[in-house]
Image: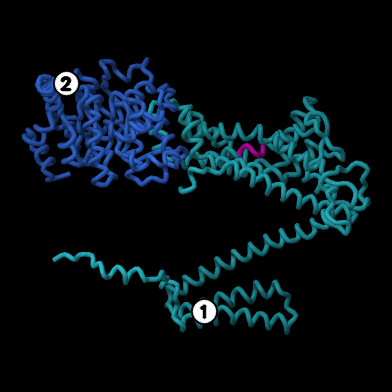
Chain colours: A cyan, B blue
């Protein structure tokens, strides 16, 4: 005999409330977890207060092993050996995550605290620091005067030149590898891989000897951009290749079956489908170079003036500005270097946010 | 390939000619639109198909049946030059479309694929396009000029049995559709370029019974105007939609052959080969 939906029961069911039974733990287990979590922390707190052992040593040499042990014991007591392995893994991964989080936040924290000293003084927000250049400024000039506006312009110009060169070539290389699939693919991949191992100073030296010493061009934003492009190209090409590889073969065959040419398959189906990933490739390429100092020391030198011509004159950039100032024996100059580091970071943040907004794919959001 | 087997394949060639004549009388069908002659297929050194001779009369439906791995899908891809995209692929014999070999050196595969469309087993809508964009994508990709885009969208989606479900959200992402809806969308996409031949590689394997029925109605409707070749694992489907059936079979580590082919009613009603009888009655495969 079959069962039929009982209409009277529907009222009963509609009164049900959503619950998450899997999140509940028995009280006994909760107590054990609490003890295992609090005991090591309490012990370390006591040691910190009553002994002379420095905090970081306590954290690494006492707290982490103790926490591992406590979690292990608690797990064995409740779940047996299997559970112990489980909780050890959890404690290890949470510990490692915390560790990198602490390091990152302390870098970020000191960058913000020391950087703000340059941007924010007793006289309030110093727009001069962001928009003025370094002309008439010597290392002992007070922070109220002069700024790094010329270096921001220089960095943007050099990165733009590098991107204009490296992004099209990098994406074209990736397309050759994944879409054209010509005979030279193994060699191209080998060279791209080898290129990604080039030390940044070698890229600078290459431009210096081949293009500058030979007299073909001046030390300038363009020369710096060329050196950056050498470093950027393999990152863009390899990341774009990985991304294009993820596009299912079905899409290409599907497009070809509609009577599409190879070029249209790439331009109208593959690249649009990989848009977000290709933007990521560009972002990673920019991130690879934007803080590079060594190639610029050889190719774009430095300047105190605001240079707008990318071809003729040496030009300042944020990394070289930091490099120059941080080595000076004046506290003001070192503060300027920190300020420049903060500005560089915010610049990167702004560039990446713009790229993400441009790369947002309204149709793909459900994938 | 052994001599005995070769002779048996040669026999069918004769049969087909006879059957063609019979059917010209019965259905007063047009001439042969697409025909494969002695087609053998390799992947690298491995021969996966041998001596396939099938003629597809204009405006008919031909079902290709047979167990998995016997080369049906491989064969169907040789009919619009998609086979050559696989690295290591090779082919012997010829495929005649309107009397001309599509593998002639002066033939542009892009042109062939525009005339001989294909629907794949797994739905493959373009994720970067809307539903409307997917339907019209063939026109853009092939550079084909057709006016009244809105009419094309409605017409083809109606043919594919999808119009009512998507008419209010033509501009939303194709990826939002369910698997069955996506499959009907790619069928509409294939129809929008008005192919003369439509190859369908198990188009209903991912569909629910209702959608399957809609697709089958569509196939019957379309066969008034175009020639359809459909690979299917569903015997009832082959019986329901096709005029002709070809039965493929491959022994372990040997290339596949067409064991028997002819009018669907004969293949299912009075097959001459024991293996065909066993297969269509579900005794293996």
The N terminus of chain B - image quarter: top left
**Residue sitting nearer the eye, B151 or A364:** B151
- Local SS, label 1: helix
The residue where tag 1 is placed is A33
Q: Residue at x 83, y 49 (%)?
A: A127
> Which chain is home to disc 2?
B
Say if mark 1 contacts mark 2, CB within 8 Å. no
Q: Is A233 covered by the magenta stretch?
A: yes
Which mark is on residue B29? 2
Number of numbered tags placed on the structure image: 2
Crowding near pointer 2: few (<14 within 10 Å), some, many (20+)? Answer: some
Answer whether residue A267 is visible to the viewer in this image: yes
Q: Which residues are magenta?
A: A230-234
Relative image position of residue A180 (x, y in whole percent): 48, 29
Instruction: Check disc 1: other Cα within 10 Å, few if <14, some if 14-19, many if 20+.
Output: some
Quarter of the C terminus of chain B within the rendering: top left
Q: Secondary structure at mark 2?
A: loop
User: How far is mark 1 from mark 2, CA to CA?
Assistant: 80 Å
A133 vs A104: above or below = above
Q: Is residue B113 left or right of residue A8?
A: right
Tag of residue B14? none
Image x and y of residue A297, in percent:
79, 40
Magenta portion: prevailing SS class: helix
Name the spot of residue A23 as percent of width and height, x first.
45, 72
Up/down of A268 relative to A248, above or below: above
């Amino acid at each position: 005999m079959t069962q039929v939906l009982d209409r009277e029961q529907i009222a009963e069911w509609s009164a049900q409330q959503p619950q998450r039974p899997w999140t509940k733990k028995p009280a006994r287990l909760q107590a054990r977890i609490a003890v295992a979590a609090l005991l090591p922390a309490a012990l370390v707190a006591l040691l910190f207060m009553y002994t002379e052992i420095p905090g970081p040593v306590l954290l690494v040499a006492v707290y982490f092993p103790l926490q591992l042990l406590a979690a292990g014991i608690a797990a064995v007591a409740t779940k047996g050996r299997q559970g112990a392995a489980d909780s050890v893994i959890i404690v290890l991964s949470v510990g490692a995550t915390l560790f990198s989080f602490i390091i990152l936040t302390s870098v970020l924290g000191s960058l913000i605290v020391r950087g703000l000293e340059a941007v924010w003084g007793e006289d309030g927000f110093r727009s001069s620091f962001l928009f003025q250049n370094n002309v008439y400024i010597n290392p002992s000039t007070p922070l109220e005067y002069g700024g790094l506006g010329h270096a921001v312009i220089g960095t943007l110009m050099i990165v733009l030149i590098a991107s204009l060169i490296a992004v099209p070539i990098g994406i074209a290389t990736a397309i050759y590898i994944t879409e054209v699939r010509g005979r030279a693919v193994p060699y191209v991949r080998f060279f791209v891989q080898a290129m990604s191992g080039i030390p940044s100073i070698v890229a600078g030296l290459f431009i210096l000897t081949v293009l500058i010493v030979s007299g073909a061009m001046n030390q300038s934003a363009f020369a710096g951009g060329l050196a950056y492009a050498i470093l950027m190209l393999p990152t863009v090409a390899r990341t774009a290749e990985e991304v294009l590889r993820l596009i299912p073969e079905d899409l290409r065959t599907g497009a070809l079956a509609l009577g599409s040419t190879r070029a249209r398959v790439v331009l109208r189906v593959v690249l649009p489908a990989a848009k977000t990933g290709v933007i990521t490739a560009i972002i990673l390429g920019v991130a690879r170079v934007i803080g590079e100092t060594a190639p610029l020391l050889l190719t774009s030198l430095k300047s105190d003036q605001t240079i707008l011509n990318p071809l003729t004159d040496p030009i300042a950039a944020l990394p070289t500005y930091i490099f120059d100032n941080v080595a000076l024996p004046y506290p003001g100059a070192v503060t300027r270097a920190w300020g420049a580091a903060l500005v560089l970071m915010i610049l990167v943040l702004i560039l990446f946010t713009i790229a993400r907004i441009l790369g947002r794919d309204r149709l793909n959001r459900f994938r | 390939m052994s001599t005995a087997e070769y002779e048996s394949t040669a026999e069918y060639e004769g049969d087909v000619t006879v059957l063609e004549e019979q059917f010209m009388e019965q259905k007063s069908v047009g001439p042969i639109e697409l025909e494969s002659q002695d087609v053998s297929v390799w992947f690298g050194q491995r021969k996966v198909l041998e001596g396939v001779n099938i003629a597809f009369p204009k405006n008919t439906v031909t079902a290709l049946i047979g167990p998995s791995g016997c080369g049906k899908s491989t064969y169907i891809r040789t009919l619009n030059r998609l086979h050559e995209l696989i690295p290591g692929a090779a082919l012997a014999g010829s495929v005649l479309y309107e009397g001309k070999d599509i593998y002639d050196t002066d033939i542009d595969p892009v042109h062939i694929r525009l005339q001989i469309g294909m629907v794949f087993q797994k739905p493959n809508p373009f994720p970067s396009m809307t539903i409307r964009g997917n339907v019209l994508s063939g026109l853009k990709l092939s550079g084909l000029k057709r006016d009244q885009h809105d009419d094309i969208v409605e017409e083809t989606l109606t043919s594919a049995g999808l119009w009512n479900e998507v008419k209010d959200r033509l501009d939303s992402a194709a990826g939002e559709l369910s698997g069955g809806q996506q499959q009907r969308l790619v069928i509409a996409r294939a129809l929008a370029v008005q192919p003369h031949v439509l190859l369908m590689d198990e188009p209903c394997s991912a569909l629910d019974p209702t959608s399957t029925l809609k697709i089958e109605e569509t196939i019957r409707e379309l066969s008034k105007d175009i020639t359809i070749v459909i690979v299917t694992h569903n015997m009832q489907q082959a019986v329901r939609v096709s005029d002709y059936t070809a039965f493929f079979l491959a022994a372990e580590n040997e290339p596949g052959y067409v064991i028997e082919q002819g009018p669907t009613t004969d293949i299912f009603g009075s097959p001459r080969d024991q293996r065909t009888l066993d297969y269509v009655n579900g005794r293996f495969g």
